[in-house]
Image: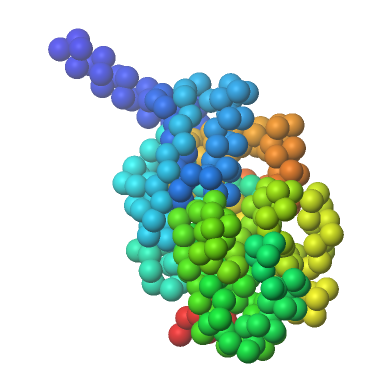
Amino acid sequence: MKRVVAIVLAGFAAQANAQSGSWSPTQNVEIIVPAAAGGANDLTGRLLQRIMQEGKLVPRAVNVVNKPGGGHSIGLTYLNQRAGDGHYLMVETGTMLVNEITGKLNVRHADITPIAVLYRDFVGITVRADSPLRTGRDFVERLKKDPGSLSIALSSALGNANHLAAAMIARNGGVDVKKLRIVVFNSGSETMTALLGGHVDVVAGPANLAARHLPEGRIRVLGVAAPQRLGGVLAQVPTFTEQGTPGVLANWRSVIGPKNMSPAQVAYWDQVLAKVVQSDDYKKEVERNLADPIYLGSRDARRFWDQEYSELKGLLSELNLIK
């Protein structure tokens, strides 16, 4: 009987602590990455893991779990099977919203818990160094002649930022975007492997992905879908707007949790991630990846998701990617 009473009292105490905002992890934390290892989402997840553990920001171990496939649906399903559990986070992008809009996903953005928006990275168009395409203008002119003449690789779902950037640039250059030949891979690293192996003609992906390979001399970046030139090794790469085809599009990296997280759990991760983005390691990595830091906490992240949903729906419709 005493044991039963103790368990009941412990339950009441845990509930009281949660309601008072004093939640913290009592088991290992998982950061879910809805893509294969090696891509931008995976690198983001592992950066968060490293800073949380090395900075002792979380009292338990933090593990990265890759759940690629299904346009992020596999990762999202895994996440929401743990409703109300603050031990599970996931790195997410606009891919979730696109798949919701296009009806490819049963999970709606209202069904998850936005925790933070971390940063945005702009999309670059990349070819092999031996490609006959030397500029962004060459890319557009080739597609104008024959929209299906180039295989364009991207990760990790149709309609995401990488796809939208390529489609926007092509559309603005007078190309029929419905005839583009798009090849989807599970991660950005897989797209680059396919490009270097001669299996695809072009990669549309995060500019920092191209930046990691550019010093090897095996690729050429035709242009970036950014408002101005980026820094680092891409400082000499012109924007598509400079090359006569306007197109600006970024992919944002966000952290979400499962549905029905408590206010105490959200508040806990709010303060942890606020410390993460202030760390020197995080700032250096964001700068190295040529990303634009736009950190938003949970309250502003919810509004951001709603706004992004409306903007993406309009863009997808404009590009004839939805009916």
Q: Residue at x 78, y 68 (%)?
A: 239
- The colour scheme used here is rainbow
Of 3 and 41, which appears nearest the observer?
Answer: 41
105 displayed left or right of 46: left
Of 172 and 131, which appears nearest the observer?
Answer: 131
Res. 107 in view: no
Which residue is farthest left? 1
Q: Residue at x 47, y 81 (%)?
A: 322
Of 158 and 260, which appears nearest the observer?
Answer: 158
* Residue 207 to residue 170: above or below: above
Of 251 and 214, which appears nearest the observer?
Answer: 214
Task: Give residue 165's quadrant in the image.
Answer: bottom right
The spot of residue 153 in percent (x, y) is 53, 66
The spot of residue 41 in percent (x, y) is 54, 48
- In the rendered image, which quarter contains the N terminus? top left
Which residue is farthest top? 2
Which residue is farthest front? 130
